Amino acid sequence: MEVHVNYLAVLLAAVANYVFATIWYAVIFSSTWKKLTGITEMKPSVLNIVLVFIGSLVLSYVLYHSIVFGDSYLKMSGVKAGIMGGFFSWLGFIAPVTLSTKLYEKKPWGLWLLDNGFWLISLILMGAIESFWI
């Protein structure tokens, strides 16, 4: 099955992810994040910013495909498909991987909850955005 990718949708969802991350970590939960990580100053380098945005693009591209496959095989479309695609991507890929990392690195549970709250909302937001163009 060939997937027609709407690259504008992928780009918009990646930008939304990046903007939401800035709001989540630098505005809403800045002091909480600093306390939980022990990092006192949040000043990312240009390289970090570029690499994180590339990661957002890759995530958006893969999420787009999962929503297309869900639409094709599950006959689910629209915003509901985008929300479900985002939720199940978080549940199946983000939550278990970050849980393993949390357990072995012995980071605070609050940091796991903060990060996973971000990823859950972000993936649902990205899925909803992308679903408009599928």
Image (tube, rainbow, N blue to C red):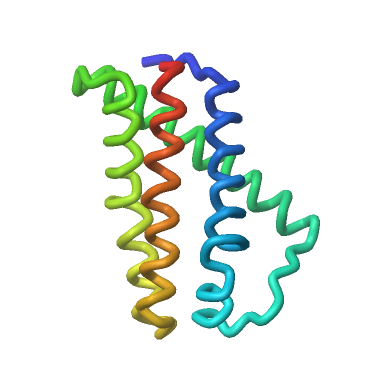
The one of 87 and 58 positioned closer to us in this rendering: 87
Q: Nearer the viewer, residue 72 or 53?
A: 53
Left or right, residue 41 beside residue 26: right
Is 51 situated above or below 114? above
Q: Is residue 20 above or below residue 62?
A: below
Q: How far from the left and from the top, in percent, is residue 5?
A: 50, 19
Task: Tell me if 72 is positioned left or right of 28 in this view.
Answer: left
Name the residue rendered at 28%, 52% in the picture.
91
The residue at the point 38 percent across, 61 percent down is 116
Q: How many marks?
A: 0
- In the rendered structure, the answer to whether residue 76 lies left or right of residue 20 reads left
Which residue is farthest front?
Answer: 28
What residue is rendered at 68% in x and 52% in y? 51
User: Within the image, what quadrant is residue 48 found in?
Assistant: bottom right
Q: Position of residue 119 (x, y in %)?
A: 42, 53
Image coordinates for residue 128, horizontal then vertical, percent: 39, 30
